Amino acid sequence: SEALTPVATLKARPPPAPREGVELAVQALRAHPEDIDVQGCAFAALQGLSAEGPEIRQHMADVGGVEAMMTAMVNYSTLVKVQSSGMLVLARMCGDSKEHCARLASNPQSVLTAMEVLREDVRVQEAGCLMMGRLATYDSGWRLGVVRAGAVPSVLEAMQVH
């Protein structure tokens, strides 16, 4: 029989338990950084799994999901599925704890760049605004960093356009 592609392999399996699904998706991000289809499917899976609750999102952080997602978001800065799903998952994680936000607060520019490049996509704009809002609510230093990075004009533009 023919070998299945990484995406077909993921689709051919019965649905895993949420924790296992997180591990598989993070492994897929790391193992296939050049495969745009795998990246998109892994982000879609992580977005769905992140809705399972804070315990699953904590597991994502524990297995290196934040770093894997941020790396892919930099590598695929113009891919809507990666940007919108990634920002939504990371915003949910940021909403869970200040510790998750701390990992993201160091680089608000990556979110703002995606918002600028993909300004016509409402999902990216919504997720980016949510992320900026979450970062700005936890800490006055982060709020200042978000403002200095240019978030206010980006968020206002997103609100006007969409």
Image: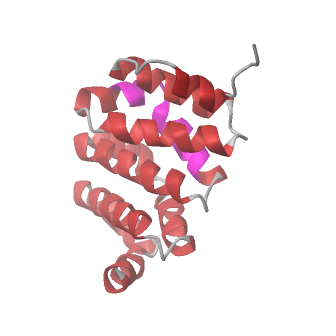
The quadrant where residue 157 appears: bottom left
Tell whether 10 sits left or right of 60.
right
Could you tell me residue 41's position as x and y percent? Answer: 53, 39
Magenta stretch holds residue 60: yes
Task: Check the image and report above or below for 99 versus 145.
Answer: above
Q: Nearer the viewer, residue 95 or 82?
A: 82
Q: Quadrant of the N terminus?
A: top right
Is residue 66 on the magenta stretch?
yes
For the stretch drawn in magenta, the main secondary structure is: helix
Q: Nearer the viewer, residue 145 or 8?
A: 8
* Residues drawn in magenta: 59-73
Instruction: Give above or below for 85 relative to 14.
Output: below
Q: Residue at x 38, y 42 (%)?
A: 47
Q: Residue furthest right?
A: 2
Residue 135: horizontal and vertical position, in percent?
32, 57
Residue 16 at what x, y percent from top left? Answer: 40, 18
Instruction: Give the position of the C terminus as an image quadrant.
Output: bottom left
